[in-house]
């Protein structure tokens, strides 16, 4: 059933622009709503792909979760519609594209940018956790930038809406916390671990446990085999924050609140995010 004021969108309501990228299960296009001229990103997902991989429930959950989330650092999902063979997600357009692109282009980020992104992520994740949502797939590809360079977490395709311990595996290995790699029940603290991984990757240009093979990465994560290269030169405070997040015992990781109060964040992050 449709809520009374819910507009039923269709492809005819949009003028399709350039392709923005091809994500999983489909492509994303720049689009404009014909009447309001409002610019959006339109993600096209093929139904036969969703059926083939049996992820209808995941997509449904994403839509439920995303429509209830409102935060400056979370990419909006305005709505969706479908035709005979495709599902369309009407998304906020992130003009700056993937943060990944900026990281690859520059090699590594300044402490000011890294701290600003980590602060924005901590605030967005604290908001998600208040709503009992664990994203579980925070990685540079899922982080977008708006026209002001503000970070937007996207793609809640892997998120879960519950306090219950989750056992399903998801995401690439580099960003998985030990308890996820061990396929043990995990909770909110997985996102805190991932912030430590991202903070390291923003400052050094590579994730901390990168290795030739998946099994080597697995081993390095389980051992928390962490070392800091001598270049680029990174402040002691930044290393302190990383060391307080990449802790195997999930209960001992720095809380999201404490991250926003860490000296390195206070000193280096732009307050406007
Ligand atoms: O297009 C790019 O590569 C980058 N780009 N550049 C600018 C830009 N502005 C907005 N969005 C972009 N990309 C889409 C980001 C997403 C948000 N939410 C998603 N959700 C999803 O894919 N869910 C989903 C799909 C298939 C199956 C299942 Cl289970 C879940 S994808 C943008």
Image: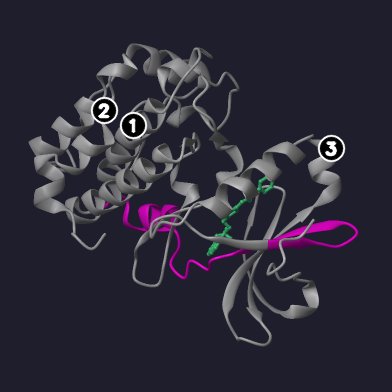
Residue at 86% in and 62% down: 83
Depth check: give the residue in front, 249 or 140: 249
Q: Nearer the viewer, residue 9 or 240?
A: 9
For marks 2 and 3, the one nearer the N-term is: 3
Residue 52 is situated, as x and y percent measured from the top left of the image, at 84, 37
Q: Are circles 3 and 1 on residues that touch, CB within 8 Å?
A: no
User: Residue 268: x percent and y percent?
Assistant: 13, 52
- Pointer 3 residue: 52
Q: Which residues are magenta?
A: 80-109
Q: Which mark is residue 245?
A: 2
How packed mark 3 is, by other alpha carbons closer than 10 Å (few <14, some 14-19, many 20 or more), is few
Q: Does dot 2 land on a helix, a strand or a loop?
A: helix
Give the residue furthest to the right.
Answer: 84
Counting the numbered discs, the total is: 3
Closest to the observer: 256 or 26? Answer: 256
Q: Position of residue 95 (x, y in %)?
A: 47, 70
Q: Residues within 10 Å of mark 2 (few under 14, many from 20)?
A: many
Q: Residue at x 41, y 17 (%)?
A: 178
Give the labeled residue for mark 1. Answer: 192
């Amino acid at each position: 059933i449709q809520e009374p004021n819910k507009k039923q969108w269709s492809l005819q309501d949009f003028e399709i622009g350039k392709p923005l990228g091809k994500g999983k299960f489909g492509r994303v296009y720049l689009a404009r709503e014909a009447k309001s001229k409002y610019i959006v990103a339109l993600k096209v997902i093929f139904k036969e792909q969703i059926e083939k991989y049996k992820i209808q429930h995941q997509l449904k959950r994403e839509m439920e979760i995303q429509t209830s989330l409102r935060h400056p650092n979370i990419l909006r999902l305005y709505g969706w519609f479908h035709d005979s063979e495709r599902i369309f997600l009407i998304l906020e357009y992130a003009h700056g594209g993937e943060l990944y692109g900026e990281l690859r282009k520059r090699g590594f980020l300044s402490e000011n940018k890294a701290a600003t992104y980590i602060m924005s992520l901590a605030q967005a994740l604290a908001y998600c956790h208040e709503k009992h949502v664990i994203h579980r797939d925070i990685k540079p590809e899922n982080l977008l930038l708006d026209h002001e360079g503000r970070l937007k977490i996207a793609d809640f395709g892997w998120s879960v809406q519950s306090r219950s311990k989750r056992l399903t595996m998801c995401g690439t290995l580099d960003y998985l916390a030990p308890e996820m790699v061990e396929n043990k029940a995990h909770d909110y603290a997985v996102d805190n671990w991932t912030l430590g991984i991202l903070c390291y990757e923003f400052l050094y240009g590579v994730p901390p446990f990168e290795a030739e093979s998946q099994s080597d990465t697995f081993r390095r994560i389980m051992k928390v085999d962490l070392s800091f290269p001598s270049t680029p030169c990174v402040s002691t405070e930044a290393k302190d924050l990383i060391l307080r997040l990449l802790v195997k015992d999930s209960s001992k990781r720095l809380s999201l609140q404490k991250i926003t109060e860490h000296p390195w964040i206070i000193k280096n992050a732009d307050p406007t995010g």
